[in-house]
Amino acid sequence: MRSFKIFIFISILSIQNSLLAQIENVQLNHPVYSFLKEMYVKGFVEYIKEDDPVMSRFEINKLLNQIKFNEAYLSNTEKKLVQKYLEEFSDDLNSENTTQLFDPKNNFVSDLPELLSQKVKYLYGYKEDGNNIFLEGLGHFYHGQRFSPLPTNNANLYDIGFRMRGTVFHQLGYNLTVIKGGVSGNDRLAEIIEPKLLSNYKWVEAVENIGNYGFNYGYLKFHTEPMKEMNLAIQLGREDITFGYGYGSKLILSGDNPTLDFIKFNFDYGVIHFTSIHASTVGNFSYDISQRYTKYLALNRLKLSFKNLFDFGIGETMIYSGRGIELGYLSPLAFYKFIEMDLQDRDNGTLWMDFQTNFLKKLQFQATFYLDENILSNLQDLERFSNKTAYQLNAFWYEPFSIQDFSLIAEYTRIRPYVYSHRIPENTYTAFGVNLGHRIGPNADEIMFKANYNLNDRIRLTGEYRFSRKGNNVYDENGNLIKNVGGDIFLSHTIEEENRPAKFLDGERINTSHLILGFRIEPIREFYFDIFFNYISSKNLSKSNTDNLSYGLLKFTLEY
């Protein structure tokens, strides 16, 4: 009888997906991804693309239905969350749970009171079989208050925008998002509470009388299913993406970098999951236009996923610049390192392998091993300068000690000297001067502990502690380099340094503790309030001094 129910469930779900599929992606910062991860660890989701987490709306809707099928085993909060997200991702304009401000069926004024309702909200929506459009309003307000060191100061960020998304011809998803904002108060504090300002052109250029910034995203995404359970997707455009495993930050693409323009190819069939990305970005900012340049990132990744056992993946990246698109790196079926050798060894190549367990319910382990440049010839000499390696170990425990709606995360990251750097400065593993990889950079390690608790379906509590150690390059009082220990991503080794050992954490030692406490509350659907307290203590062991920073952040997000 149970097998028959499963068959009926899958059949209905397949019909719904073929008729009502929304191909456009769900933005990376949506809280549904955290919920899906928790349900994946709990064992109620068969598979999520956690290493390449951005998914189409129809994919998320499918996963939510898998969770709904196990409703009898969910906590009360989980039941409310899955129902809440099912209402949101169904995009059913005829449902009593949705409302739109500009509704042709009603006059404008009649829908204004529903702005404060618990319904799914749109500025405007139109939907027919295979073709639709949804227009959503966006707004953010940040208030940051620095408490120490004295004197105290504050910063405010405020922006407004819109998102136009939908699917046409059943298979082509689209998205256009524009956000424009301004800043008042202390600029340095504004950059701390919103790090993406550091790689935003209007903010960095700073030629106008008020600090301002803007973000824009847009893409087309084609999806097809040529055979049952075979999925093929091609996406062209720009949006925020990350890549690889990691709960605090990631070794491959952390997501802290500026938005990339890319063409992306995804193939999923059975145990095989393949991704290929070719992206463009820019180098460090310069007021001299002649010094600005384009650089490219190529990425290929193959993963084998064995249900209820483990996932194993291998991938590679290549950073290059100084020329147009390199055809050799466009092929998804190629080994970049061999191609680079044929192109006379000018580029910055990396290779990584990762592993994730799936055989333990409520407990999941991950591991990533990252190799930069000279891959295999000197792995036995762990202190050699060319041994540019890194690794990360992660654990995710959901419902520890039988505490419902609670998760614990532990993560350790170790990055050797000179990782991400390159002998050609334009080919560093950066975009707009920001590290594409893990936030701590080279010659550093970090341990992180994090706890999350869903008090109910509208309040989520978070606590996080990080402790990092870093070895910085040594400079004299005039700013002249005394010793290069591989701690600066923009400074590679010299020929003279090739025969010297590169000891881990050598140089000017900085130990940093970072405590984050906060919560998110959604009193009205799509009205989010995030409140956080941060305390950062950085101790320079070489100079015996300590810098402390504490600040609070209130963030309001509106998506109508």
Image (cartoon, helix red, strand yellow):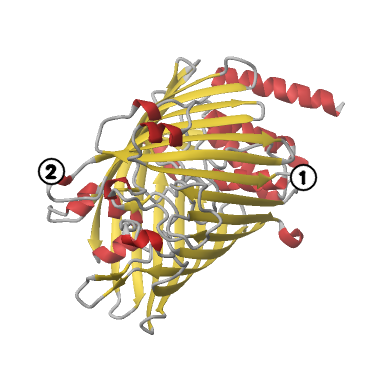
Amino acid type assigned to the residue bearing label 1 in the image? Tyr
**In the figure, 376 relative to 24: above or below?**
below
Depth check: give the residue in front, 33 or 165.
33
Depth check: give the residue in front, 262 or 169.
262
**In the figure, 75 relative to 102: above or below?**
below
Between the C-alphas of marks 1 and 2, the distance is 62 Å
Dot 2: element: helix
Depth check: give the residue in front, 321 or 220.
321
Read off the residue under disc 1: 73
Count every numbered label the image shows and give the total.
2
Amino acid type assigned to the residue bearing label 2 in the image? Ser
Residue farthest toward the right in the current orientation of the protein: 1
Q: Is residue 125 visible?
A: no
Residue 117 placed where, x, y %? 49, 44
Q: Which of marks 1 and 2 is in front?
A: 2
Which picture quadrant has residue 195?
Answer: bottom left
Instruction: Residue at 28%, 39% (x, y): give it.
Output: 321
Residue 457 placed where, x, y %? 60, 51
Dot 1: element: helix
Q: Is residue 470 visible?
A: yes
Read off the residue under disc 2: 290
Classify residue 89 as left or right of residue 145. Answer: right
Residue 77 placed where, x, y %? 66, 50
Classify residue 505 as left or right of residue 293. Answer: right
Instruction: Residue at 24%, 50% (x, y): give it.
Output: 284
